[in-house]
Amino acid sequence: MAFDNIVLDIYIYTGLSSGYTGSDKRYTLNKSLITGETKINFEIAELVRDYINIEFNDDYLSYCVWVYTDATVRDENDTEFTYGSPISNTYLALDGFGYFEEGINPELNRHALISTSTLYIPEGTIGKLPLFAEGVGKVVVDSSETEISDNGNTNQKIQYLNIPANSSIIRVYDTDDTTLLKTININNVCEPKYTPYKVTFVNKFGAFQDLYFFKKTTESFNVTDETFKRNIFENNNVTYDTYRGQRERYNTNAKTSISLNTGFVNDDFNSAIEELFLSEKVWIRWNNKTLPIIPTSKNLELKTSLNNKLSNYTIDFEFAFNKINNVR
């Protein structure tokens, strides 16, 4: 008997990889073999993503889940095909993405969870570096060394290392503590005129990444409303009051927009700008609150020192809520 179909049970859970129970089963998929083919493929990324609910309040938590799959291979009589069955696998899932040119199911960084090798941080400000704990042994910031440990729990798989104020360079090492995996240079920016704003977004690795905008910021808002025409005629007196309008507004509200400027950045920083444009979850630290925003700039010209000499990015955002509170 040859195999005909596969029943795939998918468990999604947090905690330790071995900590799943029957209540963690989220999906059961059944797929039949296409005539002439020898393999059955399942695409489960979007199903898993529904269970990674990312929120941010300047708290930098680890958002990832374990995915345990159990595949039962069956023959044309729908009985279990014993050879190689059941097939079980366990994966750690983050809400990231790969680019087309990286091919199918690319394995993303297993050390520092950022693409850029340059960070711009305001002088005197503590920064954050997202790390994939199980792939990092230690991190050296200037001459200060920090050991990174991994206890297997999802709540610490992504760790955010504090970057001391006014640091210069970060070196990230493998679990052997000797193999250098990534070097990150830090530019401490002194901005005497404008107020820097911190924008935090979920990058391609599924981690929170901070990006500071140092230069000119402008704020505006767009009002929406509706009007209706009412009858102000007083039949008994055959008159009307001139202080009462014939047209009246209702459903009035507004959306606030901001335009931010990065200040001058190098070519390496283009990757961070690109991922910000593609991120579905973005926040800004605004008036001592963490508020959700949406990038409204849709076109991005990636600038280079060769073509543009000095590169400054102007990006428009819209606050992800109405000006007048109408939450019900």
Image (cartoon, rainbow, N blue to C red):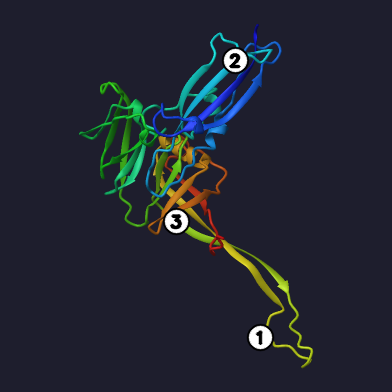
Tag 2–tag 1 contact (CB < 8 Å):
no
x, y (%) of residue 229?
Answer: 74, 74
The amino acid pointed to by label 1 is Tyr
**Would you name the residue on which mark 3 appears?**
217
In this rendering, does residue 98 appear at all?
Answer: no
- Provide the secondary structure element on which disc 2 rests: strand
Label 3 to label 1: alpha-carbon separation: 40 Å
Position above or below: 146 against 106? below
Q: Which residue is mark 1?
A: 243
Whether residue 25 sits left or right of residue 262 in the image: it is right
- Camera-near label (2 vs 3) is 2
Q: Is residue 253 above or below residue 216?
A: below
What residue is at 43 percent from the left and 51 percent from the top?
284
Amino acid type of disc 2? Answer: Val
Q: Residue 78: image x %, image y %?
A: 66, 15
Q: Is residue 156 left or right of residue 299?
A: left
Task: Name the disc covering residue 214, or none.
Answer: none
Identify which residue is drawn at 41% across, 40% down: 208
Which numbered disc, 2 or 1, marks the residue closer to the eye?
2
Q: Which residue is mark 2?
A: 73
